[in-house]
Image (cartoon, helix red, strand yellow):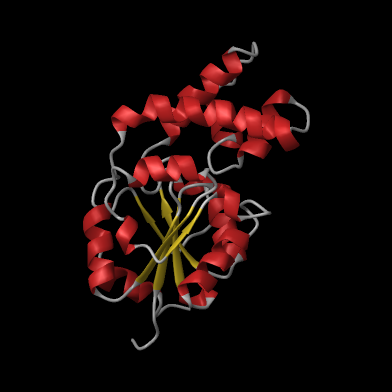
Amino acid sequence: MNKEIAVIFDMDGVICHTNPYHSLAFREFFATRNLTPTDEDFAAHMFGKSNSYILSHFLNRPISGQELLQMEDEKESLFRKIYAPHIEPITGIIEFITDLKHNGVKLGVATSAPYANLDLILSEVPIRKELGSVMASEDVKKHKPDPEVYLTSAKNLGVSPDQCLVFEDSFSGISAALNAGMRVVGVLSSHSIEELPKCNLYINNYTELSYNKIKTLFLKA
């Protein structure tokens, strides 16, 4: 295969199993406001969504501007405090990324989370030096399922969308990658196959993945 390949990872639920800790942080955040969302509520309206959407949905009114920044800072600070002692990459991802890098694959991360969360995780998961593009919520005007974060990531990596393979775990994230015209691997950390859009491949972790395996995804139409 002569064409370059780029692999772009979402962060929450893809690099680390952070979603249970986001749920804990949101529960604490909403409890101070006398709200008690269920696990089903979170599955439908939290995973893969921007804080603007989540807060507006659960508080039942538009949250924007300075109020959004203040609420987001409160909730994300709670998340970082709760999650910091528990940071652990999903099984096999370090070895998989090393294999990709050795085979000349361009690598990026594209998350809806703020930079402070990304910095926390990359301080413990040693992949930062391998990444040619790092994008967080501060870098986009439109959040997933809009394709902006993935289209910009491709541009940063110097490749076209059809050269990109995205790893995502949420409906909105997978939709964003598909809307960008990219191939997608669904990571089943937060949802079942039935709950997600159709992907090129589904995985529970990275132990069975290799450069040679993902290369075959580019041979299929």
| 82 relative to 197 in the view: left or right | left
| Quadrant in the rendering for residue 6 | bottom left
The answer to whether residue 153 is left or right of residue 90 is right
In percent of the image, x 52 and y 78: which residue is there? Answer: 160
Would residue 98 be found to the left or right of residue 214 on screen?
left
Q: Position of residue 88 (x, y in %)?
A: 28, 39
Residue drawn at the location 46% of the way across and 29% of the way down: 79
Q: Along the line of sight, which residue is nearer the eye, 101 or 164?
A: 101
Up-down: is 164 above or below 81?
A: below
Q: In which quarter of the image is residue 71?
A: top right
Residue ranking furthest to the right: 61
Residue 197 x, y percent position in the rendering: 55, 54
Residue 86's spot in the image, x, y percent? 30, 30
Q: Where is residue 185 in the image (x, y as percent from the top left)?
A: 42, 59
Quick one: which residue is furthest to the bottom in this view?
Answer: 2
Q: Quadrant of the N terminus?
A: bottom left
- Which residue is at 34% across, 30% downward? 84
Question: Front-most of 125 and 96?
Answer: 125
Residue 199 in sight here: yes
Q: Report the residue at 52% width, 58% height from top.
A: 198
